[in-house]
Image (tube, grey):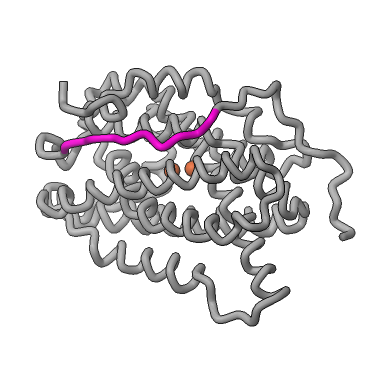
Amino acid sequence: MSNTPPASPAPVASEHIDLKARNVSFSWEDTPLHWLPGDPFANHTINVLHLLLPAGERWFVHVYKQVLPYITDEQLREDVVGFIGQEAMHASAHDDVLPHLKRLGLDPTPYTAQIDWLFEKLLGDRTLPPGAPRKWWLMERVAMIAAIEHYTAFLGNWVLNADELDRRGADPMMLDLLRWHGAEEVEHRSVAFDLFMHLDGGYRRRARTWATAFTALVFLWQRGSRYFMEHDASLPPGSKASVGQFYRSGRKGTLPSTGAMLKSIPTYLSRTYHPSQEGSTAQAVAYLASSPGANGGARG
Ligand SMILES: [Fe+2]
Ligand SMILES: [Fe+2]
């Protein structure tokens, strides 16, 4: 292939750990619709995770199960199996929030139906002939997952360090769901990228699928925020999501800052990028050891 990168990704010193899915338990009865007091826009923008992740992470699992036979590195294969277990648990934990939102008067079903269609049909297996076309589409999706995992690790790292959410009195159950998930995203942040590099690693494919994934994420996220803001009957009529609110919440620290989001672009597109260069496995593991949801649950 002509697109072999002249420089190769540079992992930081190995901090490999065995990945395992943790059983978690959350109960939502006492979590209010505005679980983040005083910032409904940030509240609902973070809530979009519950709309996108169940279908998205099940799609990761679906794709990765097809990829397992192509992996020739035993350690990587074990990592991918651990990754599959963790993502399946994430999907189901976020799924459990949706009926609670519906009980509180915010029915997510019209939006999640579209997301399900996107992942199951548009990004599904398609009826491609066996051989090269089928393999091409599989590798395209493997690369797309690596790009998406750049952002799940980015968000995981952000939420683990988002002290402003604590200062504003965010609901402890929701915060624990977000931080348990975020910590596992940081913990397994290298797997999707390592898998992509192992199976293909072409720079043009990395850049192309990043562009697709980034555009889709921005589009789906702003649509999800708008959907929640417009259907939340407790907000003043005419409440809308806007870029300005995203910028302001980022400055306050209730969402990632616009600057950090923009900086994440050249980071992923750098030819020496490796996910281990960002985030702290030690911090993630420490959070997981103390997470109420990952250690028996129950609201304290
Ligand atoms: Fe996840
Ligand atoms: Fe992940």
Q: Is residue 29 above or below residue 134?
A: above
> Does the segment drawn in magenta span residue 23?
yes
Seen at 32% across and 54% down, the residue is 51
Could you say which quadrant of the image residue 183 lies in?
top left
- Residue drawn 41% across the image and 37% down it: 21
Residue 224 located left or right of residue 296: right
On the image, the x and y values in percent for residue 90 come to 37, 44
Instruction: Please state, as top left, top right, bottom left or bottom right, where the C terminus lies in the image.
Output: top left
Q: Is residue 265 left or right of residue 286?
A: right
Q: Nearer the viewer, residue 65 or 109?
A: 65
In the depicted structure, whether residue 26 falls above or below residue 207: above
Instruction: Identify the image quadrant of the N terminus.
Output: bottom right
Is residue 4 visible to the viewer in this orientation of the structure?
yes
Q: Which residues are magenta?
A: 18-27
Say whether residue 227 is left or right of residue 87: left
Quadrant position of residue 113: bottom left
Q: Any magenta on residue 262?
A: no
Say if residue 48 shows up in the picture.
no
- x then y, percent, for residue 206: 70, 53
Residue 262 picture location, percent across and down = 58, 40
Q: Position of residue 172 (x, y in %)?
A: 23, 26
